Amino acid sequence: MRGRTGLGALLRQSSRHQGTWRPFSSSSARLATKPGDIGARPDGASRSWSTRGVLAVAGAAGVLGWGIAQVSKNGEVNGKPAVVRKPRYATVKEMEKAIQKIAFELGDEDIISTDPEDLHRHGYSEWSTVNPDTLPVAVAYPHTTEQVSTIARICHEHHIPIIPYSGGTSLEGNFTAPYGGVSVDFAFMDKIVEFNKDDMDVVVQPSIGWQDLNQQLADMDSGLFFPVDPGPTAKIGGMIGTNCSGTNAVRYGTMKDWVINLTVVLADGRVIKTRRRPRKCSAGYNLNSLFVGSEGTLGLVTEATLKLAIVPEDYAVAVVSFPSIRDAASAAAGVMQAGIPVAAMEVMDEVQMMVINKSGATAPLTWDELPTLFFKFSGTKAAVKEHISLVDTITKSNKGGNFQFAKDAAEQKLLWSARKESLWSMLSLRQGDEDVWSTDVAVPFSRLADIIEVSKKEMDDLGLFASILGHIGDGNFHESIMYNKKDPAERAKVEACVKNMVKRALNMEGTCTGEHGIGWGKKESLFWEVGPEVLGVMGAIKGALDPLWLMNPGKIMDVPGMENSYNRNHGVMPVRATAKPAGIETSLVEEELKEQLVEVNGGTANGHIATSKDEQHTETICQKAEDPVPLCPEPPPRQGGSLPWQKWPSLTLELTRLPKNTETRHLWKWFSREGNIVHLQVMQQDERRSSSRAPEASVRFEPPPSRNFWNNGEYTVTHPQEDTAVRIKILPPRQDAQEWSYGPFSLDPAGNIIRMTGVRGQQRPMLIALKPTGMDFGVMTGPNTMSAMKRAAPMEEEPLVLELNSRHRRLCIQFPHKARFPAKSRSTPIGPIIFRIEVNLVQIKTVYQLKDQNGTFTSLVLPLTQPPQYFWRNDDVGTTMADANESRWGRQDIWYRATHIAGDMTINNWYPISVNEAIPDPEHIDIGRWTCFRFQLDTDDATNKLTKQFKSALEDFNVQYVEHLDLEVKSGIEAPMWAQVDHPPSHAATSHSEALASLSLQHVFDIDFAVRYQLEVCISKGLISDHNITEEFLQKLAIEYRSPDESPNCDPNRARQRLEWLVDQKIRLDDPMTLFTNPDAGAFYTSNRLPHYCTLVRKAVVTPTTIHFSTPVAETSNRVMRKYDLIQDRFLRVQFLDEGEQGRIGIYKPQNKALYTRLERTLYQGIQIGDRRYEFLAFGSSQLRECGAYFFCPTESVSCDDIRRWMGSFDHIKIVAKYAARLGQCFSTTREIKGIQVPHIVRVPDIERNGYCFSDGVGIISPFLARLIVQEMDTDAFSANCSAFQFRMGGCKGVLTVWPEAKGMEVHIRNSQEKFTTSFHGLEIIRCARLATATLNRQTISILECLGVPTGAFMNLLDDQLRKFEAALGDKQENKQQALSLLTQFVDENQTTLIMAELLKADFIGDGIREPFVASILNLWRAWSLKLLKEKARIHVPQSAFVLGCLDETGTLRGHRTAWEKPFVNQQARSYPKQERAHLPEIFLQLSDPKIHNKSTVVEGICIVGRNPSLHPGDIRVVRAVNVEKLQHLKDVVVFPSTGDRPLPNMLSGGDLDGDDYFVIWDQSLIPKEWHASPMSFETSEPKVEDKVTVDDLRDFFVSYIQNDVLPLVAVAHLGQSDVQKEGPKSARCLSLAEKHSLAVDFPKTGVPVGWSTELQPKQWPHFMEKRSRYQSQKTLGKIYDEVQAHAVHFQPDWEDDFDQRILGRYEFEEETLDTARKIKKQYDTAVRRVLVQHKVGTEFELWTGFAMSRPVIGSDYKRQEHLGKEYDTLRQRFREMCYNAAGGHGPEKIDPFVATMYKVTEMELKQTLEKHRESLSDDLANGTLFVNTLDAHAMPLVTFPWIFPHVMIRIAQGTAKSKMHSKAGTHRESQQPVYKKGNTKTGNGQAPTATNDECKPSEALEIAAGHVDAKSPVAVPPPLGPGTAVVEVNEEMPSNTAANSDEDGSSAHKGKPMSAYTTSASSTVDSWHDAMNGEASPSDSESDSEPECEEGKASAMDKLVAMGNDS
C-alpha cells in the first residue's frame, strides 16, 4: 500500500496553485496581543483576537480540513502517496547548547534543571505499565506562557523533543522521553488566572489540581465547583491531554465537555487561543476537540477556560452489594435506563472489596467481600431522597443487598473513600518484586457485564490475582493485576491477558482506553481500534502542526522511521529484542515473543516470530521504505528477558538478623573475600522501617561477586559477641538503579553501561578508560609548546589509567609513583603509591591530540588553568574505617587527599610555602604549578576505537578536541629565573661598580620588593610562566640596571604598575617582554596616596597544592597596621581555601589529614617571598571565621613577638582560644579618632545580679565626644547624631552610649569591657549606630511558626511585598512612588536604599529620563530582594527596626521576672490575664523621622525582640515598648532594662551589649500565641586551661578550629530538621541542635569543639533548601519558596539608555579637565575591579549598593554585605579626596563642575563601547534572525565613578548648584590654589566651614564642633505603627540658627549654621539633608591665598575645643 502525504505539503501546494495561502512560518499571524492592547493580560498572554489573527487561524483551519478531506480510503492524496520524512533529533551536545540558550533567554538558570533525580522523575514512572529506556536531557520549569513559547521556539530551532509534564500520574508512559529532549514541567503554572463567577467559568493554568481548584472555589464561597474528578493528584493539564473523566462522568461527562477554550503553544513557539469565552460557538473548526485528548502531541496547553457547575444543595452516598458482577451490572443498567440522574455509579468486584479490607484503608469499617455498587446522589434534598428510593427499588429487583447510607458528611467521606482508595489498597499489598498493572477499556454499558465476566475468568484460569473496578455508569472499567515483574513468564501472561481484554472490548464496539489515554503503551491497541486510514489522518494532522515531530514524540503513534520498541521492566534498564542476552535460553525468548505477537483479527497468543522469509503482520498494511518513511505503525515490539545477575553493573545485598553492635568494619571482614565492595551501610534505628523485614545493613559489590553465596538466603558470620546466620536479600538492578544510572544512561544487551545521547541508536560508554603507556607533568610555555617536567609510567602491575566518567562529569587520572610515608623505615625500598587526579569537566576547555611522525603512538595533551584535586590510595582498608561511629563506608573513602608528591612524603613539611616549591627530592612533582598533562597512547585498533569514543564524549560536554600538529613537547628543566632572583642582596662589594660586576657574572638581580611581590602575583595566577622569564626581562625589572637618564618607565613604580596592569587585565603573556612595549601597560597608573585611616593590604590564598598572591588593595586599617605603617609591606593577610578557591577546607576526617598538615606547615614554616619569610602573627575573630590570619616578616628591629608585646599584656589569660580572641581585638577594622589623644576615662561598676552581668559590654560617652566622632568619621547625614558607637580603646571593647551625665572628654568604662591592659589608649570606632528595617529569615519564621504565628501572617507580608515590587517596575509616576515607598520603608544595613530614594526624587527615572546607573541599581535592588526572599525567606516587616542594643542606665525599665512568667510558660497568649500583661519586660525604642527634621517617634505596645540567628523557641521574647522621658535622647537604638532576674539580651540567643544588633517587631500579626517559651539554659563545657599560652598554642588552636568548625553544618541541619520534625524547633532533635549551635558559636572563645555526625542531618531535606534528596515541604517556608519562585529575576545592568542631559548640558567641559577626570577614573576603575575580583562580585553596581547577587565563598550574605559596604566606603572616600584636590576645593562652585566632568568622561567611554558593540551585531545576523547579543559586564567600562558623589549629582541635576549654566568646568591647579587638608576641624557634614568673606573664623568652627550650632539629625525610616502600638512624637526644639528657620524660598535666614555648610542655594525640591550626605558639599572655598591661614585657624579652634572639653 502507498503512504500518505503530510499536510505541510498540502499547504504548500495550496499556496502555489491558489495563491491565497502561505505555509506556516514565523511571520504568520499569531493569536496573541501585545501587552497593553485591549484585552491583553498582565503577563502578556492573549485575551483578544485581532482581525488578522482570526483570518489566519480560520484559513489554517480551512486548509487543515481540506487536507484531511483529501485523504481517501486507500491513503492517497490527489493520487499521490502521503510520505513523511524521518525526523532528525538533536545530539546531546546540541541539546546542551539549546538548554543554555533557554536559560539565558529566560534570564534564570533555575528554570532549567539537569539534576539526575529530576530527570529520572520526569522520564520514569512506577505507575506506568511501560517505560522507555531513556530519560529527558533537561527539565524546564516555566512560569508563564511566554516562557513556554520561548522554550518551544528554541527547541524547534534545534530539533529537540518537548514532553509536557503535569501531575506525573499517567499510566501508559504518557510523559516518558523515548528520544530524550526537554520535559516541560508546569509545576509553577498552578494558579487561577481569572474567575468569572457570573459567567460560571474560570481561567486556570495547567498544573493546578482539580481538587485544589475546587478548594479555592470553596474558599471564595463561590457556590461553584469543577465536576470532573479523576485521581486525587491529577492536574488540569494532564486531564485535558488524556480527556479524562472520573466517578462523576455519568452525571457530568468527561473533560472535553467542560473546556471552553485553550491557550496553546505550538511546536514552533507560536501561541494560539482556540476560541473566545461564550458557552456556544459555531465559528470554524472545533479546535478544542483537536487538542483535548491529544496528550501534548500537537501543542502545550498553558491556560484553559473551564465551565463550572453549581454546587448541589444536598449530597448522599450509598453502597449495596450483589451476589455476582452480572447482577451488579444489571442493576446499573436498570438505573441508567430508568433515567435516574445519579451523580456517580461505581462498581468494585469481590476481589477489590477483599483488598480494601486487607489494606485497612477504611478501618474500622469492613465490607462484605462481594461485588459492590457505590452510588453518589446530588441535587435538592427532595430530589436526592426520591432518587435514593428509586435506586433502592431497582437494586433489590436485581438481588441487591441492603442499602448502606451515610448518616453525615464524615460517613459519606468514609464510604466513598473505599472507591478512591482502591488503587492504593492494591499497591499496599505488594511484596518483594510484585507490582500492579493497571489498565482500562470501555464498552457500551450493556456489554459491561459480559467483558468483565470473561476477563475475570481468563485471569482466574491463568492464576493471576486481579481486581475489577470501574465507572459502570458509562461502561468504563479498570483491571488491576498483581504480578511478579521479575518473572518473565508471569509478565507475558499479564501482557497477553491485557491485550485479549482490549481485543474483546473492540469486538464489543468498545475502545482500548476510556480515560488513561494511549501514550507510549497502547499505540498497538489504537492501531487495532481505528485502523491505518484513521491513524493516517491523525498523522497528517500531527505533521501539519508539528512537522518536525517534536511534541511528545512516540505517543499515540510512532515517529516515522524511528525504532519504537519499548519494555515493561518498570526501570531505566532496557531489555532489547535485537540481541539475545547472555544466559537466556532461546526457547524462553521465543516464547516471550510469541506471547507478544497477538493477531489483530481475533488471533491468540500463538503467533509466529517473523523471519526474513516470514513477513511480519504489518507488512500487509504498509510498504517498506528507507527514506522517506511511510507514515504507518511499527511492527509489534519484541521483548527480551532480564539480564543475569553476573551482568548487572552492581549488586546490592540487604542484611537482617545482624549481631548487636555491628559496624562497617565487621561487614568488610565478612564479605570482602566475596568480591569488590564499593559501599557499606549499617542502618540507624530511625532509618529502619517498622516491618520485621526491614534491612539492618547493606553491602554493594561492583562488579557482582563471582559466586551466588546468597543462594540459600543465609550467610554465617563471626562476631565478637556472637556467631550467627545473617539473612540476605538481593536487590535487582531496578531497585539499585539509582546508585549507578543517572541521566540518559542504560545497559546494552551484554551488560555494558552505555550512555544514550537522546537519539536512539547513538550510544556511547558511560565510562571510557584509556591505559596510557606514559604520562608527563609539565607547563604550557606557549600556544604551541609544552615543557615536560616529570614523567610517570606503569609500575609493578599498576597501570596508568585515564578515565572519563560521564555520570559524574569528570576526568580521573590514576598513576603509580615512587614514594613512602614516615611509617615506613627509611631503609625500606621506595615502593609505588597510587595517586589519583580528579578534574571536573567544566575545568577543561581544550584537549589536544598529537601524533608522532612514525605513527607509533598518539598523545593527548590536557592543559588546565588551575590545579586539580589530588588523592593517594590507602590500601589498608581497615584504617579507613577507624571512626567507629560512622555507619557508612564507601570505596571513595580509601582515597586520601594529597597536597604534594615526593619520594619522601614528609619532606615538604620542613620548608616554607612559596610559589616556587624547590624541594630537594628527585621524585618531587610540583602539582600546584605543573598543570599540563600529556598522555602517550598506543595506536592499536582497540585503543584507537576508545580514543574516538573519548573524543566524542568530550565534545558532548563542550570540550574542544583539537588535532594539533604543531604542538611541541620539550623536556623541561627548572625555571632559571629563580636562581637569578632568590638570594640576599650582596654587601661584600666595596663599590657600586664591583657590585654590578659581581651581579653581571652571576646573572643575579636584586629587585625592589614591591616589584618582586607583584611578579609573584603574576606567576601565581598563571599570567606569566616562570619558564618564559628571561634575563633580559629581569634586567628590566632590576633597579641596578636603571640610570637616571633612562626613560621614566624604568623607575620601580613603573615596573610594578605594568605588572599590576597585567593582573587587572587577566592577560596571559607567553612573551613577558611584550609587557614593556604594550602602550596600555605603559599608560597605566595607580596612586599610592591614601587617607590616613587606610592601608595597602597584601593578601595570599593558600590552597592544598599552591599559593596565590593578590595585588595590594586599600582597606581601612587596624590598630596594628597603623602603629607599623612605615613597614606595612611586611604584613601579609593569609587565607586558607580549597582548590580553585571554591570554598573552605572541610571539617576533619582522616581522608583530609594532608590538608591540615599543609595548614600547619604554613603556620610553622611561614611563607617565602624572595628573601622575606613571613611568619605567623595572630588572627582576629573575623579572620578566623574566614579561615585567615595575619603574617609578618620580621625586620632587624621588629619581630612578631615585639608586635604581640606591644599589643598588650595577655599573660593573665590561660585559655588559648580566649588569648587568641584578645589578640584579635587589635586587628578589628577601626577608625582612629585623631582629635582625641586619650579621653578622660572614668571607671564605673558593672550592674550584676543572680550571677548575670546586665551591663556586659556597654559603657558611656559624652555628647561632646560623640560629636567629634561623627565629624571625624565623615558619617552620612543619616547618622549625624549617633546615640551609640561600637569601639575599641586600649584593651577595652564594646559599645559606648551617649548620656548627658558624661561631660566633656569623659568615657565611662566598666570592668566587663576591659579585656586586657596595654600602653595604647587611643579611641577607635568600628561603627556608629544606624537604623535599618528588620527582616524575617528562615530561622525566625520557623521559630515564630512553632510559637503559633499562622502561615497566613507571613504570606500576607510576602504577598504585599511582591505586589509592591511588581508595582515598582516601570517609569510611570505611580511606579516611581511605589519604589520610593519601598526604598524608604525597607532600609538595608548600609542605608543604600535611602540614597536610591533620593535619586528617584531627583527624577533620574521618569519624565523622559532613564539614567543608566540609577536604572541599573533599581533593577539590582529588586533582583537582590527577590533573591533573598527565595534563598533566605528575607521578608521585610514594615513595622520593625533592626538596631544596636544598649542599656537603661536609669533603671527605669522593668526587667524580666521568672517568677511571674513561670505560671504562663507554654500557654497561649489568649489565656493570659490582661492585668498581668503589664508585667512584661520593657524596652525603649525611638526612631528618627526622615521626613521632618528633628522629629522622632517612640514605639509603644506589645512587641517581639530577638537576635539573629534564633534557633531555640525561647530566643524570641515578647516585650512591651514604653515611652520614658529620661531616655528620649537615645535614637535608633533599642534600650534594654538593667533590672530583673536575668538580662533580656542574654535570653536572646545568648546576646550581650558589646555590639550585638537586635530586631524589634511590633506588627501584631507576628506576635505569637505563646509568649513565654523557656529560654535556652545549659552548662557550657569547661575550656582547657594552660599554664602559659605560647605562639605554638595559637597555631594549634587555629588548625583545630578549621578542622572542627561545624557551625554552618549545625545551622543547616537545624533548618532541615525544623521542617522535617512535626514539632518543628520544639522537637528534641532541634533543641539538641540549638544547643550544639550555641556551643559552636562559643568555640572561638572556649576552644572546645562540638561533636558532629551526619546522623544529625535529616535523611530528606525540604525542597526549599534545594538539596538533592528532598521532599515537598508543606510548612510556611515551603509555601514562601513556592510563591517566590515565579518572581525570581535575573539582574542585567542597563547600559543602553541615554545619560542625563541635565548634567551633561550644565557646563562646558575643558579638555584639560576631561583628561584629569580620565586619569582619576582609570585609577578608580582599577581599584573597583580589584575589589570585585577579591570578593568575587559580578558587577560594580553590586559593590556600590552592597547587594551582591553571588554567594560568598566563606561566611554569610549578611557579613558579606557589611564587608562590601565598609570596603567600598573606604574606596569612595579615598577617591573623593582625589577629586576634591583636582577640583580645587569642596565647595559647590568647585566640586560640582568637576563631578559633571566625571559624568561626561563616563558617558564618553560608555558611548564609545556601545558603538563598537552595535557595529559587531551585524556579524550576528543569521537566517534573517538577530542573535541575542547581550553586553558582558566584564567587558563594559565602569559607570559608578561620578556616583561616588550622589548628592552632588542630585544638586547638579536639579539646578540648585551655585555655578551658572554653561560655566567652564576647569581643573584646580595646586600652585594657584592650596586645598584644605582633611583634619580634625570638620563640621557635621565632614568638611571645614568657611566664612562668606573667604576668611576662616576659628570661633565659628569652635561653635560648630562644640555643638552650640546644631548639626543635622540622622535621617532614618519611620516604620509604620500598627494596632497594639502607639506613637509619641518628639519634636525637638530647633534653634533659630538651623535650617528649619529658613526663608520661604529655601535660603537660610541665618549665617554660620550647618545648612550653609551643605548648600548655598537650597531648593524646596531637595530634601534638607541632600548635600550633607557623605560630606560632599562644604562652604565656598576661597580663591585667595588665605587658605593656609584657615588651616591654622582650624587647628587653633580644635585646640581650644579639646581644652574646653577637658576643662568641663
Image: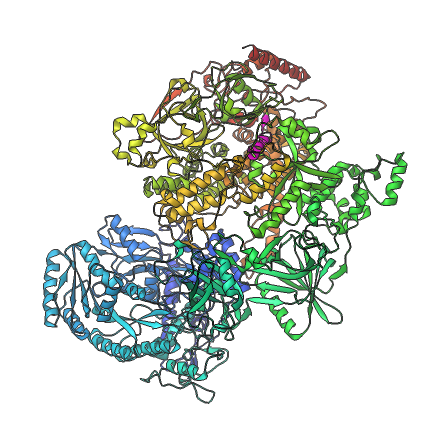
- Residue farthest along the top direction in this orientation: 2007
Position of 649 relative to 1631 (above/below): below
Percent x, y of residue 823 = 65, 53
Above or below residue 1019? Residue 681 is below
The residue positioned 32% from the left and 54% from the top of the image is 203
Determine whether 1724 is above or below 706 in the image: above
Viewer can see residue 1408: no
Residue 1226, magenta (yes or no): yes
Number of numbered discs overlaid on the protein picture: 0
Quarter of the picture holding the C terminus = top right
| 944 vs 79, nearest the viewer | 944
Q: Is residue 878 left or right of residue 1667?
A: right
Residue sitting nearer the eye, 281 or 21: 281
Q: Magenta includes 700?
A: no
Magenta residues span 1215-1231
Q: Can residue 1885 be seen in this view?
A: yes
Q: Which of 1157 and 1471 is in front in this view?
A: 1157
Horizontal side of residue 1274 vs 543, given as left or right: right
> Where is residue 205 drawn, in percent x and y?
35, 55
1313 sits left or right of 30 in the view:
right
